[in-house]
Amino acid sequence: MLDTLIPFAHNWLGAMQVDVTRYVIFSVGVWLALWVVLAAPLAGRKIRDSRPAARQLLIEFLTSIRSIAIFSTVGLLTFALFRAGWLPGPYIAKGWGPVWFWTSLVLMIVAHDAWFYWTHRLIHDRRLFRRFHRRHHRSNNPSPFTAYSFDLGEAFINGVFVPLWMILVPTQWPVVGLFMLHQIVRNTIGHSGYELFPARKDGRPLIPWLTTVTHHDLHHAQAGWNYGLYFTWWDKLMATENPNYLKRFAEVTAKTQKGGKGRKLETTSSPSPA
């Protein structure tokens, strides 16, 4: 019995170490870079005037570590299947060559965005919100540490995507590593509180199909809108994009003649979509 459990314990601890390291590097790194080192030169890109209290940052950090523990536990499913020889996908994908390697990465990111959008909308239902999503929205003014600050149910929903994908789609393990890297980079930047995405001369996002920091910050300010994670496609298609989004993005990226500071995002309420 012990010989059976030891490999699972090693896998769980290894997954925890990798994911905690990745989370700490990017959450602390983004916070340090934007909130400390570059705070003055990027003052015009700060979305809100206020900053969350230190207590909020600590709670977000500890809750995120708890979420990572859940991710690692859910990940034991793929480890068990792979160990039993019931997960041939990684071997199949390796035989399909480098074109599939990069194609599967793109597809995984696109599929995760769809998974996130629809599960995110689901847990905003009043019957589920308090149990599944309230913790994340306690960070009304988010920070890079908010990235994995989830209730237990939401952590499970987010963690189960990778095992489901690996079961259904032949994918190499290094692709999963790159996917997780992309995910944590976008997640910490998306909660950073600084609009880092470039704007066109007319004030609109240069790449309109990517979610910007303002896009997700508006979701924390006005929760009935902007459910997308990486792309704006689903919000546009389902009419759940905040009607003030483009205006707010233009405001926060606009430069004034005095000191290059942008006009700050306000958190006035807007009617939620039906």
Image: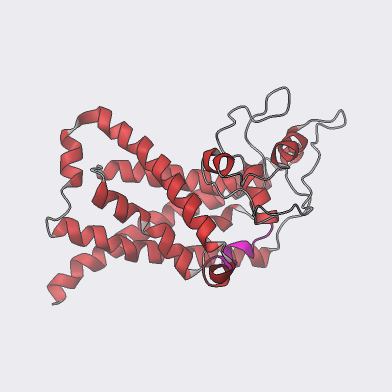
**Residue in the image at 48% along x and 53% along y:** 118
Report the magenta residues as a range: 133-141
Q: Where is residue 171 in the image (x, y as percent from the top left)?
A: 25, 42
Quarter-of-image position of residue 43? top right
Whether residue 82 is situated above or below residue 189 in the rendered picture: below
Residue furthest bottom as drawn: 1
Quadrant for the N terminus in the image? bottom left
Quarter-of-image position of residue 74? bottom left
Residue furthest front as drawn: 274
Colouring used for the render: secondary structure
Q: Is 91 placed left or right of 191 in the picture?
A: left
Quadrant for the C terminus in the image? bottom right
Q: Is residue 171 magenta?
A: no
Q: Position of residue 195 (x, y in %)?
A: 67, 39
**Nearer to us in this view, 36 or 183:** 183
Q: Where is residue 95 in the image (x, y as percent from the top left)?
A: 15, 34
Q: Where is residue 77 in the image (x, y as percent from the top left)?
A: 26, 62
**Nearer to us in this view, 49 or 113:** 113
Q: Is 244 placed left or right of 206 in the picture?
A: right
Whether residue 58 is situated above or below residue 237 in the rendered picture: below
**Residue in the image at 62% along x and 62% along y:** 137
Whether residue 239 is situated above or below residue 50 in the rendered picture: above
Q: How many labels does the image show?
A: 0
**Nearer to us in this view, 163 or 12:** 163
Q: Does the magenta stretch include residue 137?
A: yes
